[in-house]
Image (spheres, rainbow, N blue to C red):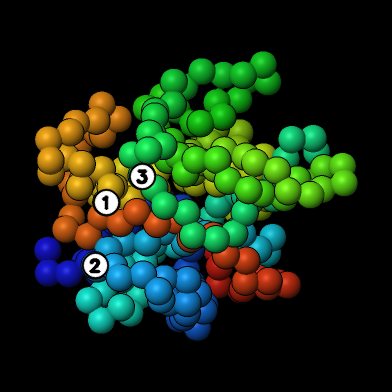
Amino acid sequence: MLDGESLRQNYAREVDRRLTVPEDEQQVWSLRLSQLLADRALAPQYVVLVDRSPFIQAVAIYWMAPDRTFRFIGASPVSTGKPGSFDHFITPTGLFEHTISNPDFRAEGTRNGNGIRGYGRKGMRVYDFGWQQAERGWGRGGPATMRLQMHATDPDRLEARLGSRQSKGCIRIPATLNAFIDRHAILDGDYEQAIAVGQSFWVLSREREPTPWSGRFLVVVDTGGTSRPALLKKK
């Protein structure tokens, strides 16, 4: 593997729900990443960005190159918090670190009372970013704490709705993107550091193909767009 951009080809092969993002839109997200990570001394690594704008609802993976430019790898539709119902939060914006202090787990694939597999099919990884401050989407609003996670969703009834706000505050992503992030250790920078000193983690897949650029940051932004870009459509 020559550099982190080569994973773009894997994204195209392995992720079945992808967005065609115009270059100017890619640059908007890249600028946000540059601003939010400017004060951190970071080695080259992958970063996951989510645009929670109601008219965008997208997730993108970027590679931060040695010159600190952000190179677009791929994008897919997501669902973030949908206000209006009890216990529904507006997904918070900001920089969220993925660490072993908030251990990930895997979906059991069980259905709730409505027949929904909330974390997706059995074995899907649930990425945990710990307790975070968020805005209540019900009642009088105001701040409160929620557990911020990124995970797959019900493949039969909810995955088709990705690209619109649907969740209680967490970030729902396509199952194939979940597997891609898991397989290539996109967010496993802290896990990789712990493995290097002898720790082991049951949650890590046996099919992992880690790169030298495992990252640890989820960045959630709201670009405030008022209409969905014409080319932000599934291939």
| Marker count (numbered) | 3
State whether residue 49 is above or below residue 85: below
Q: Quadrant of the N terminus?
A: bottom left
Reading the chain from its start, which is encountered first: label 1 or label 2?
A: 2
Q: Quadrant of residue 157?
A: top right
State whether residue 48 is above or below residue 85: below
Q: Quadrant of residue 8?
A: bottom left
State whether residue 30 is above or below residue 63: below
Q: For label 2, count other residues whose C-alpha is less than 10 Å away and answer few (under 14), some (14-19) or many (20+).
A: some
140 left or right, relative to 152? right
| Dots 1, 3 in contact, CB < 8 A | no
- In this figure, which residue is indicated by the disc labeled 1? 189
- In this figure, which residue is indicated by the disc labeled 2? 43
Type of amino acid at the residue the image marks with label 2 = Ala
Distance CA(mark 1)–CA(mark 3): 8 Å
Q: Position of residue 164 (x, y in %)?
A: 66, 52
Res. 224 in view = yes
Residue at the spot x=69%, y=60% of the render? 54
Type of amino acid at the residue the image marks with label 1 = Gly
Reading the chain from its start, which is encountered first: label 2 or label 3?
A: 2
Q: Secondary structure at mark 2?
A: loop
- In this figure, which residue is indicated by the disc labeled 3? 99
Type of amino acid at the residue the image marks with label 3 = Thr
